[in-house]
Image (spheres, rainbow, N blue to C red):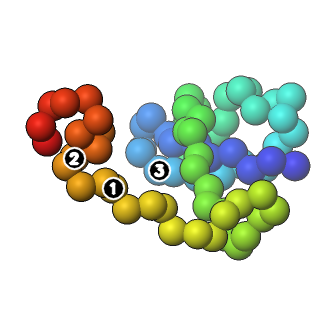
Amino acid sequence: MPLYEFRCRTCESTFEVRRPMAEASDPATCPEGHEGAVRLLSVFASVGATSGTSSAPAPAPRAGGGCGSGCGCAH
């Protein structure tokens, strides 16, 4: 079951609720008992390598600017 993050509009507390995806948008009550908490957009980090990713460093920028002076901008 997914874990959703909410913020209470009354007391500004942030809390998590584990519930089915079908109930993701249902109203939540904060631990202090206030109604009307809003769901937050949570960001998570993925640690470790997965197939299809490259561990090679990004190529260094070309001399002359971001375009490599190919456009004639003289940077």
Residue at the far left in the pictured view: 74
- Residue at x-position 51% and y-position 68%: 57
Q: Name the residue beneath numbered marker 2.
A: 65
- Residue at x-position 69% and y-position 45%: 4
Give how far across and how far down residue 68 sits, in percent: 28, 44
Q: Which amino acid does label 2 sit on?
A: Gly
Q: Name the residue beneath numbered marker 1.
A: 61
Which is nearer the eye, 49 or 29?
Answer: 49
Q: Circles 2 and 1: CB distance less than 8 Å?
A: yes
Mark 3 Cα within 10 Å, few/some/many (few <14, many 20+)?
A: few
- Residue at x-position 59% and y-position 46%: 42
Mark 2 Cα within 10 Å, few/some/many (few <14, many 20+)?
A: few
Compared with residue 54, is residue 14 higher up or lower down, i.e. above or below?
above
Give how far across and how far down residue 15 sits, in percent: 59, 52
Q: Circles 3 and 2: CB distance less than 8 Å?
A: no
Task: Work out whether mark 1 precedes mark 3 in sequence or the reverse, and give the earlier one.
Answer: 3
Q: Circles 1 and 3: CB distance less than 8 Å?
A: no
Q: Nearer the viewer, mark 3 or mark 2?
A: 2
Give how far across and how far down residue 54 sits, in percent: 66, 64
The answer to whether any part of residue 31 appears in the image is: no
Q: Name the residue beneath numbered marker 3.
A: 13
Q: Exactly how many numbered labels are in the figure? A: 3
The answer to whether any part of residue 41 appears in the image is: yes
Q: Distance between the residues labelled 2 and 1?
A: 7 Å
Q: What residue type is labelled 3?
A: Ser
Q: Distance between the residues labelled 1 and 3?
A: 45 Å
Report the side of 65 relative to 23 (left or right): left
Which is nearer the eye, 43 or 49?
Answer: 49
Report the side of 69 relative to 19 (left or right): left
Q: Which amino acid does label 1 sit on?
A: Pro
- Residue at x-position 78% and y-position 57%: 52
Which dot marks residue 32? none
